Image (cartoon, rainbow, N blue to C red):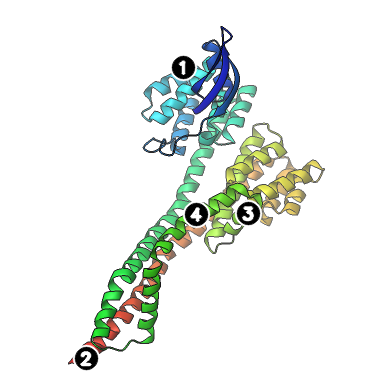
């Protein structure tokens, strides 16, 4: 549901303005018509800074559950309107309940199911709504919903795999940095003060620790602000500069170990979405253009757009993919087999399955190695600090004795 500011004319010919929630512009117009107001102009109202705090979000799991319920109840012969009406009354998540109510009201006003969903592209994704539209047009909505359910479950599985690799290193890394900063700010200065008062000598490791401690204490505000400044700066340039976004997204795939895994997962997602849309009856170029959106990567989007231009110029799909470097060579060979055999959707599913398994195997290899590697890093940092701190203390105590 979106907030709109609108200007219109009521039935007495008087200009009116106000605010209203609607799924999309068409829904807004329908709602105003029911209120005997003719819409003249509108704009989306930006949410306040704290408007979303505490509000439940619609997660992928919610969309999977809704899709599964749509499919099962349609199969049982329940009408779509009755399904949505029942779900909106029984769902516990307020955000989902609000969304379903908006979809129901839009359809009640004459909007198609896919049209009613269009106001929630962020929640359902760019692939979901066009496929629902195809299902409505061809009378295969139940089949399309089943395919979408499988796709969303698979994507949820991919996301959990990626999180599994990232969560542990992130937590351990944060703890290590926090502990080191606290030691540099509070512990090291006091210890060094004690050593100097006792007339102890500072070795190279200790001097390096003192320099580091002084730097941290003098620049602690900048050090703490830097991650936030970097995050906001990257977000700003990603939004403002297409060239920067392409280079940034390309650089992600070059990160050691993690980069190749992410690349394989992106290829698997694109191939899976492309297979579903192409099998549903969408033209290959349109399906390809839409499927790359699921990857959310400007670098891959640029390559896909080039491949589409080459295909539209008459180049075979596998040659266009090779020229534009869209897929790895193994995937292109599979696509070529599908193109020659006339079984492209199955070939794309094979590509998706192959790279999904590749990514899974890599993750399974990385996961056991992450903990020991981080333990070694922690041991090195703690060992350096302990040696630098305890060494002078031991020497000082020895001299006193």
Find disc 3 in the rendering and name its residue.
244
**Pointer 1 local density, CA inside 10 Å: few below 14, some 14–19, many at least 20:** few
Find disc 1 in the rendering and name its residue.
82
Q: Residue furthest top?
A: 12
- Residue 35 visible in the picture: yes
Mark 2 or 1, nearer chain start: 1
x and y percentages locating residue 379 in the rendered image: 35, 73
x and y percentages locating residue 142 in the rendered image: 55, 26
Q: In terms of image quadrants, where is residue 260?
A: bottom right
How far apart are labels 2 and 4 at the CA level? 49 Å
Mark 2 or 3, nearer chain start: 3
x and y percentages locating residue 259 in the rendered image: 56, 59
Find disc 2 in the rendering and name its residue.
398
In this rendering, the label closer to the viewer, 3 or 1: 3
Mark 4 or 1, nearer chain start: 1
How far apart are labels 3 and 1 at the CA level? 48 Å
Helix, strand or loop at disc 4?
helix
Relative to 259, is 315 above or below?
above
Q: Residue furthest front?
A: 14
Q: Is the Cβ of the residue at disc 3 closer than 8 Å to that at disc 4?
A: no
**Residue 231, numbered label:** 4
Out of 149 and 194, give the one closest to the viewer. 194
Q: Is residue 32 left or right of residue 61?
A: right
How far apart are labels 4 and 1 at the CA level? 45 Å
Q: Is the Cβ of the residue at disc 4 closer than 8 Å to that at disc 1?
A: no
Mark 3 or 1, nearer chain start: 1
In this rendering, the label closer to the viewer, 4 or 1: 4
Q: Quadrant of the C terminus?
A: bottom left
Relative to 210, is 275 above or below?
above
How far apart are labels 3 and 4 at the CA level? 14 Å
Mark 2 or 4, nearer chain start: 4
């Amino acid at each position: 549901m979106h907030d709109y500011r609108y200007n219109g004319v009521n039935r007495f010919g008087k200009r009116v303005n106000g605010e209203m929630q609607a799924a999309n512009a068409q829904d807004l117009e329908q709602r105003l018509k029911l209120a005997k107001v003719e819409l003249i102009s509108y704009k989306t109202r930006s949410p306040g800074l704290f408007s979303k705090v505490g509000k439940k979000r619609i997660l992928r799991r919610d969309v999977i559950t809704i899709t599964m319920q749509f499919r099962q109840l349609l199969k049982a012969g329940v009408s779509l309107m009755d399904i949505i009406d029942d779900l909106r009354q029984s769902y516990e998540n307020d955000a989902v309940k609000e969304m379903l109510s908006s979809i129901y009201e839009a359809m009640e006003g004459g909007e198609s199911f896919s049209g009613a969903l269009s106001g929630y592209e962020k929640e359902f994704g760019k692939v979901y709504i066009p496929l629902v539209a195809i299902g409505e047009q061809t009378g295969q909505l139940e089949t399309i919903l089943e395919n979408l359910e499988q796709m969303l479950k698979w994507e949820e599985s991919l996301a959990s795999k990626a999180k599994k690799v990232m969560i542990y290193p992130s937590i351990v890394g944060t703890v290590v940095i926090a502990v080191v900063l606290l030691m540099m700010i509070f512990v090291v200065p006091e210890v060094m003060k004690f050593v100097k008062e006792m007339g102890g000598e500072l070795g190279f490791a200790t001097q390096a620790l003192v320099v580091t401690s002084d730097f941290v204490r003098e620049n602690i505000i900048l050090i703490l602000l830097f991650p936030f400044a970097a995050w906001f700066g990257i977000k700003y340039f990603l939004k403002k500069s297409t060239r920067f976004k392409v280079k940034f997204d390309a650089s992600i795939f070059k990160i050691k170990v993690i980069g190749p895994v992410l690349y394989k997962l992106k290829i698997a997602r694109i191939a899976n979405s492309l297979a579903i849309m192409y099998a549903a009856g969408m033209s290959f170029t349109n399906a390809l253009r839409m499927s790359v959106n699921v990857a959310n990567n400007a670098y891959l989007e640029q390559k896909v757009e080039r491949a589409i231009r080459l295909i539209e110029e008459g180049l075979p799909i596998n040659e266009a993919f090779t020229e534009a470097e869209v897929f790895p060579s193994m995937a292109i060979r599979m696509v070529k087999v599908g193109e020659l055999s006339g079984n492209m959707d199955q070939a794309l599913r094979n590509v998706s399955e192959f790279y999904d398994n590749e990514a899974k195997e890599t993750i399974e290899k990385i996961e056991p190695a992450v903990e020991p590697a981080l333990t070694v890093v922690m041991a090195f940092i703690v060992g350096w600090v302990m040696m630098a701190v305890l060494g002078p203390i031991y020497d000082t105590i020895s001299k006193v004795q």
